[in-house]
């Protein structure tokens, strides 16, 4: 089921929806009277009924229990502010959530919101994208109801030169969320691909607005193939792709995955602001699919072959070529040579 677009006066409605769900989940038996909901929320019984109906329209299974009230029977796997914020433990990233049914691109929407002054940590999520953006101008296939497409607005007090460091923030956080939510063992391929069993399951695209000496804002774009099936992938992919569901052999719930991702992003970002780049760099290297491997890097200036030695202070890939010289790669596609 796709995510519902915000209703008119959506902010207050979503807050009441969130409180209703919290009240349901605080009850062991899961049954709450309409009178209690009305009193707790400070709204009329008629307003309670309308909110219950709206939640049911979103896919929540809520049943009337004669003489007792309402019972929350099951929850759909949809990405809404009310669901995502329930049990979410963050201090920066995820404190503001914008969830819509369809966007041209979450990066495009997040960029516009950032220009309009949206707070740091705002997360934009779409259930589908009509023109999802990948690296080097490529399109990111974005069908509805199965994956995660999100963009995060950051305003880090760093020089533009250091902005690429935060690509590694996204990659490490996605890898950790996959470990927590899907029980898989991901690896990271420079600069921004997350692999499972050698197949690409996630990619990142950062975009920046900056002046000479400072970053005004940075958009972290993240796409994760969660429950996409084989027949949903385009046939002309440049690199073998898969999804968490295919690799795990089971469906992976999007809500727990997204909460885990936001918590990991938040934790690493707070640590980055306090302690700098090196802890993030070490976390990336620990999950790297290319460290010590012989690779071929294809870019605008041709191909280079060598053994990966690491990444430098701005995230460039360091490889030792066949002459024993260390080459510094700023951009390109990496292929692991068997």
Image (tube, rainbow, N blue to C red):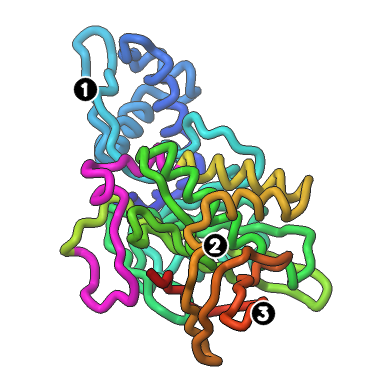
Q: Is residue 80 above or below residue 74?
A: below
Task: Kindly identify which residue carries mark 3.
Answer: 325
- Position of the C terminus, as image quadrant, is bottom left
Q: Secondary structure at mark 1?
A: strand
Residue 192 is situated, as x and y percent measured from the top left of the image, at 51, 64
In the image, which residues are magenta?
232-258
Q: Residue furthest front?
A: 323
Residue at x-position 21% and y-position 14%: 65
Residue 315 position (above or below residue 278): below
Q: Are marks 2 and 3 in contact (CB under 8 Å)?
A: no
The picture places residue 274, in percent across and down from the top left corner, at 78, 45
Disc 2/disc 1 C-alpha distance (Å): 57 Å
Can residue 31 be seen in this snapshot?
yes
Number of on-image labels = 3
Neighbours of disc 2 within 10 Å: few (<14), some (14-19), many (20+): some
The answer to whether mark 2 and mark 1 are in CB contact below 8 A is: no
Q: Residue at x 33, y 77 (%)?
A: 238
> What residue do we see at 33% from left, 43% from top?
78
Q: Secondary structure at mark 2?
A: loop
Give the residue pinned by disc 1: 63
């Amino acid at each position: 089921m796709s995510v519902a677009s915000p209703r008119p006066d959506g902010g207050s409605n979503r807050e009441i929806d969130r409180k209703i769900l919290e009240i349901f989940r605080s009850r062991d038996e899961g049954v709450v009277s309409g009178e209690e909901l009305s009193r707790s929320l400070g709204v009329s019984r008629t307003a309670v009924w309308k909110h219950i109906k709206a939640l049911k329209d979103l896919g929540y299974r809520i049943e009337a229990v004669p003489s007792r009230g309402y019972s929350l029977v099951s929850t759909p796997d949809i990405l809404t502010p009310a669901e995502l914020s329930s049990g979410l433990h963050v201090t920066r990233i995820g404190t503001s959530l914008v969830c819509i049914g369809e966007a041209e691109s979450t990066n495009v929407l997040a960029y516009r919101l950032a220009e309009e002054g949206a707070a740091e940590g705002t997360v934009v999520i779409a259930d589908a994208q009509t023109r999802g953006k990948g690296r080097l101008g490529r399109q990111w296939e974005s069908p509805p109801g199965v994956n995660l497409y999100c963009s995060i607005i950051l305003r880090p007090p760093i020089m533009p030169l250091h902005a690429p460091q935060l690509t590694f923030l996204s990659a490490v956080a996605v890898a950790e969320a996959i470990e927590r939510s899907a029980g898989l063992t991901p690896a990271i391929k420079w600069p921004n691909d997350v692999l499972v069993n050698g197949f690409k399951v996630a990619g990142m695209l950062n975009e920046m607005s900056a002046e000479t000496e400072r970053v005004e804002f940075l958009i972290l774009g993240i796409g994760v193939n969660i429950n996409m099936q084989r027949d949903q992938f385009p046939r002309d992919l440049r690199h073998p792709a898969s999804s968490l569901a295919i690799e795990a052999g089971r469906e992976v719930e999007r809500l727990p995955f997204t909460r885990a991702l936001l918590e990991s992003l938040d934790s690493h970002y707070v640590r980055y602001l306090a302690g700098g780049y090196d802890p993030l760099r070490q976390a990336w290297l620990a999950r790297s699919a290319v460290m010590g491997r012989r690779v071929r890097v294809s870019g605008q200036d041709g191909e280079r072959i060598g053994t990966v030695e690491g990444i430098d202070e701005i995230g460039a890939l360091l490889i030792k070529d066949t002459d024993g010289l260390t080459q510094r790669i700023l951009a390109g596609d990496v292929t692991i040579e068997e």
